[in-house]
Amino acid sequence: MGYPGKGKWIARASVTMRYVLAVVSVAAAAGFTKVFLHFHLPLAFNAFALTAIAITFWYGGTPPGIFAAVLSALVRSYVFDPEINNASRVLYDLVFLVFALLMTGVTRARNELEVRVAQRTDELTRANEDLKLQIAERNRAEENLRQSEAYLAEAQKLTHTGSWVWEVARKEALHLSEEWYRIYGFEPEQGMPVWEQRLQRIHPEDRARWQEAIDRAIIEKSGYEVEFRILFPGGAVKHILTVGHPILAASGDVVQFVGSSTDITERKQAGEKLRQAQADLERISRVTTMGELTASLAHEVNQPIAAAVTDANTCLRWLTRDQPDLEEAREAASRIVKDATRASDIVSRMRSLFQKGTPQRELVDVNELIREMIVLLRIEATRYSISMHTKLAADVPRIMADRVQLQQVLMNLMINGIEAMKSVDGPRELAVKSRRGEDQQLMVSVTDTGVGLPAEKTEQIFNAFYTTKRDGTGMGLRISRSIVESHGGRLWATDNSPRGASFNLTLPSKEQGHE
């Protein structure tokens, strides 16, 4: 803590010391002059006095310097040349005065120079500090950039995604990331591959589609997304997903594309394995369901076979008579053909449900599929005193779908309805309806009068492994919904009043599928 007036005291002491400097300088000049005189040397006070004045001006400032000049004049006149005439005295005083004025100018110039130097030094100091801050910020930014680039490179490596930028006019790559080189199998040390090299890497069967996507993006000045394959010299193949975004010039023309290329080979392989597993699961579900209906299906097949045997015996009797009745025999033979055809149709339907193969989309008449399922499940429904009836609209559109998969959906929904009514008292009815919905959609509903749906769980019943049956797997409805959704449709369930449930599905018509 400072004392009051300390600053003023220091200022006064500083001013006093400057005047003391003037006195000491002039006294030193007088002393040196005395020494010169003692040794009989020429009077040198003027030179010493001018030196003292100069020293005082330089180190003490202008007022002390003037004081030193006046003091020197007095010492010169009254100490060393008291008898000098007035003209000489005035001349010496004039010399001191002129020198004092010169030193005043010099001192002022020096002070101004010192101020400018101080200002410039201060400016340079601030500029140096600012430059240090800028350098430090730049170093931090460069370090952050290096870290970001390292993080980006690691992220691209983890996601198998390479970034790129290419110029439209010259078809020249401006930037290719390390991961891009790894995906496409080029060496960064050999420089950026030219357009022809990149084009040759694309699978010959996909080049036209890839080029078409880029040409359309340039014309429409829009982004593009295209999936294609690349073919390596050794024959290896990768699946690539490329997404590009246009960079427009001030004129509105596309000058560059910036984007990414992702290696989706593993995703493709996993998707293929998943589709195969789903197909196997669907087939297992169909086999399991058909196994549960073995007795009913055997009875269904046995009926036309037994009728054919009876008609065959009848035909033989008409032919072995003394007078063969060819007309009656012909009619019996016709009935045999009809019964055999009926049995063959039933077996063919069952075989189609058991067969293993890839989904085949074709135009399907859903009403026909419903009738087929009614035939297959009639005996099963009869065992439990369940009446089955249909209300099929004649104007429903045909749909582009996989026939076997839709058979499986209808069979699952109808069997669920039958099982829901096995133990209920009262009327047991299973109704299947079809009609034309909004936006040219096909709508199908399967309604029963069974135990109904679990309270507030109309969505949960479609989850995998969720079941309300004692021996259920919980996969039937999950598979059915997956099949419907893969066809662009929707499957949902609602409660009926006073009891039972209704399963509804919509499927897009042929026209919507083409759109």
Image (cartoon, rainbow, N blue to C red):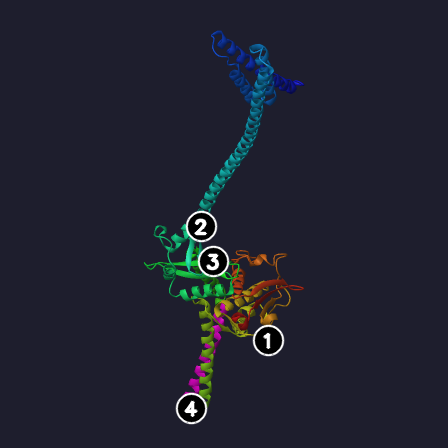
Q: Position of residue 234 (x, y in %)?
A: 32, 58
Circle 4 sits on which residue? 324
The image shows residue 130, relative to residue 505, as above or below, that is above
Along the line of sight, the residue nearer the viewer: 395 or 29:
29
Q: Which residue is mark 3?
A: 257
Q: Earlier in the sequence, mark 2 or mark 3?
A: 2
The three-letter amino acid code for the residue at tag 2 is Gln
Q: Position of residue 123 (x, y in %)?
A: 54, 34
Nearer-N-terminus badge (4/3): 3
The residue depicted at 43 percent of the width and 58 percent of the height is 240
Residue on which disc 2 sits:
156
Q: Which residue is mark 1?
A: 393
Q: Secondary structure at mark 1?
A: loop
Query: Is 317 in the magenta?
Result: yes
Marks 1 and 3, how far apart at CA: 53 Å
Q: CA distance from mark 4 to mark 3?
A: 89 Å
